[in-house]
Image: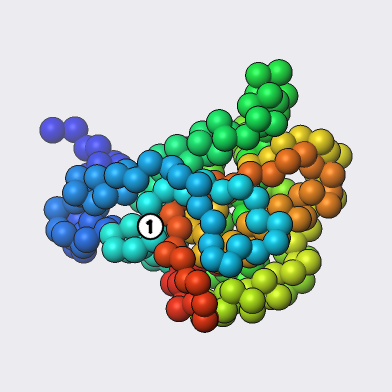
Amino acid sequence: MPWRPGTDLRALLELAAPSGCGGCEARGSRWCPACDAVLRATPPRRWWPTPTPPGMPPTWAGPAYQGVVRAAVVAWKESDRVDLTHPLSTVLTAAVSAALLGSPEHRAALAAGRPVPVVPAPSARSSTRARGRAPVRELARTALGPGVVVDALLLGRPVHDQAGLSAAERARNLAGALTVRAPLRTGLRDLPCVVVDDVVTTGSTLAECARALSQAGSGPVVAAVVAATARHPTGPLPPVVGAD
């Protein structure tokens, strides 16, 4: 039997350190059918937190950020389970499609053949260095293709880790923190944009992304995410592992 480098090396790795499902940890599958069914069970829907931060764009989200969905996102983002990029990307693709269909301005731009840039929410530089990759950007490119993804946003100042902060604290932490890369500002002018992220919690990140794009002269902004946390009417939010 001929040697198959990629397949056989993965098989050897499985023998040395068997992997489990990224959602339920069941052995024998890196992403099992049962977890895939849970991930795909909820069609994209409009989502907003309570309270909703000022300036949060219309947002479409997939399933709730809990159970096997939460486990998969954390494993993908924090444990380098890049094999989960594909199943998560299918949910993001559906959410982006729903966001586009829900916005007359975006539909009109597409019908006229105008670009509609997809802009990933940026991670802190320290997070990117620690992970050795930019997960949300990779997810967006897998979901939609590199040609439509524009890595336009970056943090213009240091921010604190969002985990454990209340909604008000998250808003203050991110207020004015994002900016559009100078070489891309002209190209984004008047174009409707779609901001994408993995998880939305309080909406502060999406609101800040929309503010930075609008301030740079973009057209209307909508957002799409893989998953959304449960709403929290009052009080501080619990830590969300894996969410920037």
Q: Which percent across, then down, holds residue 131?
A: 51, 65
Q: Residue at x 43, y 42 (%)?
A: 44
Q: Quadrant of the C terminus?
A: bottom right
Q: Residue at x 54, y 66 (%)?
A: 50
Q: Amino acid at mark 1?
A: Ala
169 to 201, vertically: above or below: below
Q: Which percent across, then down, holds residue 199?
A: 49, 58
Q: Quadrant of the N terminus?
A: top left
Name the residue that disc number 1 marks. Answer: 64
Q: Residue at x 77, y 55 (%)?
A: 212
Label 1: state its secondary structure. loop
Residue most toward the top?
Answer: 112
Q: Residue at x 25, y 41 (%)?
A: 7
The number of numbered discs placed on residues in the rendered structure image is 1
Q: Which percent across, then down, holds residue 132?
A: 53, 62
227 to 174, vertically: above or below: above
* Left or right: residue 203 compared with residue 33: right
Task: Evaluate whether residue 84 shows in this view.
Answer: yes
Q: Which percent across, then down, holds residue 54?
A: 70, 61
Tag 1: Cα neighbours inside 10 Å, few (<14), some, or many (≥20)? some
Quadrant location of residue 229? bottom left
Query: What colour scheme has been applied to the protein in the rendered image?
Result: rainbow
Quadrant location of residue 73? bottom left
Task: Evaluate whether residue 139 shows in this view.
Answer: no
* Left or right: residue 211 compared with residue 17: right
